[in-house]
Structure formats: C-alpha cells, structure tokens
C-alpha cells in the first residue's frame, strides 16, 4: 500500500454521546465509539439509574476534552442539565440536541435553535434600519 498516507491522530476528532441506550447503540454501530488508553469512553448511556451528577460530569468532561468536536445529547437529557447546556458558549465542541425514540424533539427548548433564531431576528431588525 505504497503512497497511502495515514490520518494523524492529533488532527482527528471524536463525537461524544450522552443519550439513552438505543440511541447510543445505534451510533456505536455506526462507528462513533471510542475507548482511550485509560479505558474512558466517549459516551454515556442514560437510564433510570443515572444521576444528574453523572450527566453533568460527563457533559463537563466531554466539553473540555481536546479530541472531541461534537457532543450529541438527547434533548430530554439536555433538559435535565439545561443550565449547563444553555451556559455553554464555545464553538468547539459543538453541542447538538437530538431526539430519542421515547422522547420527541421539541424545537422550542433547543438551545442552538434558540440562539440561531435570536441572531436572525437581531439581523433582520438591523437590516430594517438601513
């Protein structure tokens, strides 16, 4: 396989997941999963036994790691730690709220969508003044 260059690990980025078992399993089957040398995973499966503290700790860990570019979080889980999700303002890793099988997506509580609507409404107000 001469001529092939390998992708350097330092420039590759991961997707982290905080969601229910079915959602995480689907993404793991798609190849999103990772276990590092310290046996830490890039996902947290949330079930009835998962505490809010565990969810908060996972969110803080994933948003501070250098090798994570996107954090996918089920919207119902994001609602449990809404204060953390809403106060997060860095561009990387990006936080994306996704629906789950048992909890439909509610666009009114999506923090990213709310910010986009705010920016477009402020932009349209500024455009009307010209």
Image (cartoon, rainbow, N blue to C red):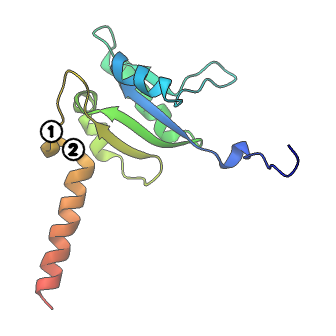
User: Which residue matches tag 2?
Assistant: 110
Query: In which quadrant is the C terminus drawn?
Result: bottom left
Question: Do tag 2 and tag 1 residues touch (Cβ < 8 Å)?
Answer: yes
Is the residue marked by circle 1 packed among few (<14), some (14-19), or many (20+) residues within 10 Å? few
Badge 2 element: loop
SS for tag 1?
Answer: loop
Q: Is residue 127 left or right of residue 58?
A: left
Residue topped by disc 1: 106
**Residue at point 20%, 21% (across, down):** 102
Using the image as rendered, state which of residue 8 and residue 127 is in the foreground: 8
The residue lying at 52 percent from left, 28 percent from top is: 42
Residue drawn where x is 17% and y is 81% of the image: 126
Q: Is residue 7 above or below residue 129?
A: above
Q: Is residue 47 positioned above or below 69 on the image?
A: above
Count neighbours of disc 2 (C-alpha within 10 A) and say few if under 14, some if 14 to 19, many if 20 or more: some
Q: Of 75 and 83, which appears nearest the observer?
A: 75
Q: Position of 31 compared to 110: left or right?
A: right
The spot of residue 91 in percent (x, y) is 43, 55
Q: Position of residue 32 (x, y in %)?
A: 52, 31
Give the distance between the C-alpha atoms of the residues marked 2 and 1, in whole angstroms: 7 Å
């Amino acid at each position: 396989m001469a001529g092939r260059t390998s992708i350097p690990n330092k420039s590759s980025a991961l997707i982290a997941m905080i969601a229910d078992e079915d959602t995480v399993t689907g993404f793991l089957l798609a190849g999103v999963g990772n276990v590092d040398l310290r046996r830490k995973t890039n996902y947290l499966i949330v079930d009835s036994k998962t505490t809010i503290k565990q969810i908060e700790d996972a969110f803080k860990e994933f948003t501070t790691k250098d090798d994570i570019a996107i954090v996918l979080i089920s919207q119902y889980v994001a609602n449990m730690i809404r204060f953390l999700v809403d106060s997060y303002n860095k561009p990387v890793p990006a936080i994306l709220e996704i629906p789950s099988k048992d909890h439909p997506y509610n666009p009114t509580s999506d923090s990213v969508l709310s910010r986009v609507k705010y920016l477009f409404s402020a932009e349209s107000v500024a455009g009307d003044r010209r």
